[in-house]
Image (tube, rainbow, N blue to C red):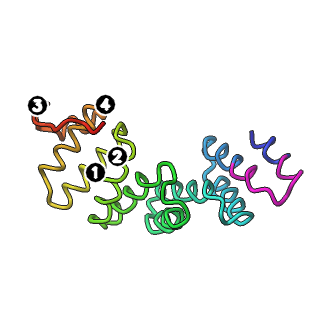
Amino acid sequence: VVATADAAAMACAAWALPDNIAGGALLLAGDGDAARDRFAKALALASDYLAPRFNLGLIAMQARDHASALAQFDAIAKASPDYLGLHLVRGHALLASRRVDEAVGELRLATTRRPDNATAHMLLGHALSANSEPKEAQVAWCRARDLGDTASAKLCTLGASALPPAAP
């Protein structure tokens, strides 16, 4: 994949897509530094190309550099507020940065837009708990449990009948 992306990049040096693809392949291969370089190159070639910015944010989250991750995610939110997956990762970064009120809002958006996403409900539960909203946290964790998140099962102490119906 990297060799094919390199060949495409050589054919058109100003095209950012091959560098983003190569970055993804390098990340999957475990070479985070090289992946970060390729994503940064793609972003330098096309600053409005959101995919490498998203990928750089994910790498920053993995490195626990939440400020850098938020910088990338905030830039995406400004350019394209409905970017797929943005609210989940931005909410996670806000929660990790202890910006709890903002995290709750962002994770509520994530669960509204993707009501079947167990991770979004689990993170919302943690944000609500950190925001001193234990009953709402329980509902979120139980919803995550019902969607298959096994870690949330330990946090959910409500019976199934205590849950409000899932949003359609």
The circle drawn on residue 120 is 2
- The kind of residue on which mark 1 rests is Leu
- Viewer-side label of 3, 2: 3
Residue 47 appears in which quarter of the rendering?
A: bottom right
Distance of mark 4 from mark 3, alpha carbons? Answer: 17 Å
What is the magenta segment's predominant secondary structure?
helix
- The kind of residue on which mark 3 rests is Ser
Judged left or right of residue 12, residue 57 is left
Taking the spot 63% from the left edge, 48% from the top edge, the residue there is 31
Few, some or many residues within 10 Å of mark 4 (<14, 14–19, 20+): some
- Residues at circles 1 and 2 in contact by the CB criterion of under 8 Å: yes
> Which residue carries the number 3 mark?
161
Q: Earlier in the sequence, mark 2 or mark 4?
A: 2
Judged left or right of residue 143, residue 114 is right
Question: In the rendered view, would you say 92 is above or below 116?
Answer: below
* Between 91 and 61, the one nearer to me in the picture: 91
- The kind of residue on which mark 4 rests is Gly
